[in-house]
Image (tube, grey):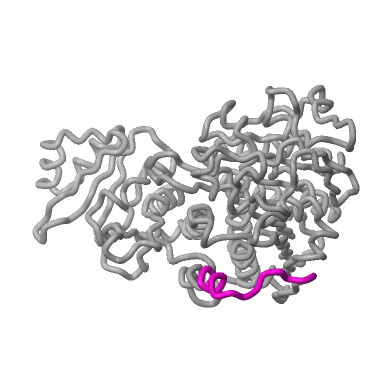
Amino acid sequence: MRNAHTAYSSCYAERGDNRIAHTASCAARSGLLKRHMTANHRVVRPLAGLAAPDTASLPLYALRPDGLADFIAKADPVQAKFLQAQEFAAKPGTLILLPGPAGLAAAVLGLGDDRSPFAFGALARRLPPGTIWRLEPGDYDPQAASLGFYLGAYAFDQLKSAQGRANRPACLIPPADAAQAVTMAESICFGRDLINMPANLLGPSELADAVMALADEFGALAERITGDALTQSYPCLAAVGAGSDRPPVMVKFSWGNDKNAPLISLCGKGVCFDTGGYDLKPSSAMLRMKKDMGGAAIALGLARLIMATGLNLRLEVRIGCVENSISGHAMRPLDVLQTRVGLTVEVGNTDAEGRLVLADLLADAAESKPDWLINFATLTGAARVALGPDLPALFSNDDVLANNILQAGESEYDPLWRLPLWRDYGHWLDSPIADMNNVSSKPHAGAIVAALFLQRFVPAATRWAHIDVYAWNDQTRTGRPEGGEVQSLRAVFRAISLITSKTR
């Protein structure tokens, strides 16, 4: 899907030397990923649960308790009696299949007072597999209903054999006024796929390939930076990836050519696997480290949604694609690293690598003087201790930006919680031999200290938000299957949509 804002031609420029030999193993990894891409270089799989508009379908009624009596009064008498016999009360999550002369005639879903997309999240798996449905008008938002349905249909099963895959879920014809829900679901599922992909199949090069393919799909101007050029321009990022046999890559792209439109800059932490480096993680803490590129996945899913919907803005995206491994080339504890802006960093802990990746990305992004600079990262366990897995931590140097994101999160049922950039903790990052340490020696406020570290690479005049996410569902809930999750994407998209509408 291209639009008037994608006037740039795709540019697969690669600077510097590329240390990756095109071995059979690399080709195999890349080939396996490409088999999951659709035609025309699209990196998004066909959306599960999506039916074509002209397909024969069955009616699906979504009801709230205060509308139940009116529905029963107007319904087919046999079906009305069937509902009453089932003691259907339109409680949230209750589903009744209604019989008819040909067998299955309709379905009724209870909503209770749930207004979130997740009220519809279980439908794709609870309705009979392979059936096709259409939503009948009711007291609900068609965008939210469609989005919840498609998010619930998602499954990361493309690495299974045909015999190992679940039955095909039920499908839904999107209402005419829910087109954006389809685009949003595609972008969310794209991000989920990236997070769920095993690290042996999605290393730095493969993640960079996905970024380049996304840029190409929407005609964005893209650049892939590796080797000596990466070391010179993004030395901290290069140091993080130096220990891996799979070299680090930085990819950035720009989209939109209206010079009067606001500039939104997104940065994503793309650590494809994190061993912790020499400060090695215990095995239990490594089990989910394929998701340590969740920040990159969120930034890319958001970028795709922005481009696919044609928001009136200019967009810049920077993704640091690295693997934090151990070898004779890996950074060591107490090494001192250079950064893009010239500040030096003492490595107090090699497992605090994400902030080193973002330091160079943020400094680069700030040079373009964006209206909003937003980064996403699975940065600290401390944020999860404070807020749990479902609430991303939001830090910002601008109250207006922060409040826009928080309010959008509430309206989109995609919540965040703001934590402070508490200046008094800044000296905890002092180092006796460098401009700063990458960690504090104190055991407190780890998420805040990490945010304060990042803030040192953002000019005070730049309106900036840092979002520390978990990027994972520990267990399946309606519309949120266990596995990768692009938390805060919908909230930030709505906030960006509002700022662009105000500038028109």
Q: Nearer the viewer, residue 71 or 247?
A: 247
Residue 281 included in the magenta stretch of the image: no
Which image quarter is the N terminus in?
A: bottom right
Q: In the rendered image, which quarter is residue 394 located in? A: top right
Q: Nearer the viewer, residue 311 or 241?
A: 241
Give the x, y percent position of residue 118: 41, 42
Instruction: Identify which residue is drawn at 49% across, 70% down.
Output: 37
Q: Is residue 226 left or right of residue 167?
A: right
Give the x, y percent position of residue 246: 64, 62
Taking the view exactly as shown, the residue that stands out farthest to the front is 328
Q: Is residue 460 left or right of residue 381?
A: right
Above or below: residue 416 compared with residue 75: above
Instruction: Identify which residue is drawn at 41% across, 48% down.
Output: 148
Q: Nearer the viewer, residue 282 or 11?
A: 282
Residue 16 included in the magenta stretch of the image: yes
Instruction: Identify which residue is drawn at 62% across, 30% down.
Output: 382
Give the x, y percent position of residue 297: 58, 53
